[in-house]
Amino acid sequence: MRFKQSGDTFIPAASRDSLVTPTATDVIKVSAGGESAYATFVIRWVQPTHFIRVAKQNSGLKLSLFYFNADQQEKAVPDSLTSWEVVAGNGTVTSGVFKPAAQNPSPYSVVMGVDRSQEDEWRWGLTIIALPMLDIDTLVDYYSR
């Protein structure tokens, strides 16, 4: 895979033409004695260039995507240039607001944010959202530490 060495992110971004996706998800099921258990693995093929911050919002948990530029200055990605994908779990992200599934929610979801400002690069971040396993106030507190 190739990386964009002259890009503006502190961590070089992988070229999209050299990598189909920055992550893969694998779910393994183990059964014994009539019981089953599942383990979810999210594999990162390349280092994330961005990170995710959260804030409490009336309608759910507001996600925002950030990165450090080449000068190590923190930069926010505008919501209009950010897309969100739930790669594990069953929550949803709409307009940057995460909500657990209404029926039978998974205890956590893994969410990927993608910066669409450079369509030829994987500019992305990944986070685990332990909602509804944790309440929203505890989750926001943990993110702020």
Image: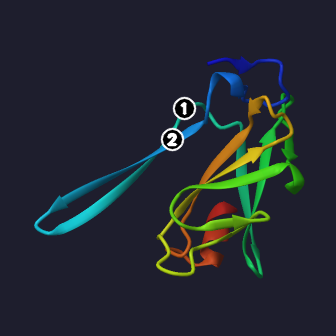
Which numbered disc, 1 or 2, marks the residue closer to the eye? 2
| Colour approach in the figure | rainbow
Q: Quadrant of the C terminus?
A: bottom right
Q: Position of residue 118 (x, y in %)?
A: 84, 34
Label 1 sits on a secondary structure element that is: loop
**How many residues crowd mark 1 within 10 Å: few (<14), some (14–19), many (20+)?**
some
Q: Which mark is residue 24?
A: 2
Relative placement, left or right, of 99 versus 40 is right
Q: Which residue sits at x=63%, y=76%? A: 136
User: Relative to 118, is 134 above or below?
Assistant: below
Relative placement, left or right, of 19 versus 123 is left
Can the viewer see residue 15 in this picture?
Answer: no
Label 2 sits on a secondary structure element that is: strand
Q: Which residue sits at x=70%, y=20%? A: 3
Q: CB atoms at circles 1 and 2 under 8 Å apart?
A: yes
- Alpha carbon separation for disc pair 1 and 2: 8 Å
Q: Position of residue 141 (x, y in %)?
A: 66, 69
Mark 1 sits on what residue? Answer: 45
User: Relative to 132, is 145 above or below?
Assistant: above
Question: Earlier along the polypeptide chain: callout 1 or callout 2?
Answer: 2
Q: Quadrant of the N terminus?
A: top right
Label 2 sits on what residue type? Ala
Q: Which residue sits at x=62%, y=65%? A: 142
Q: Nearer the viewer, residue 119 or 54?
A: 119
Q: Nearer the viewer, residue 130 or 27?
A: 27
Label 1 sits on what residue type? Trp
Q: Which residue sits at x=54%, y=32%? A: 45
Residue found at the very far left of the displayed protein: 33
Q: Position of residue 108 (x, y in %)?
A: 51, 65
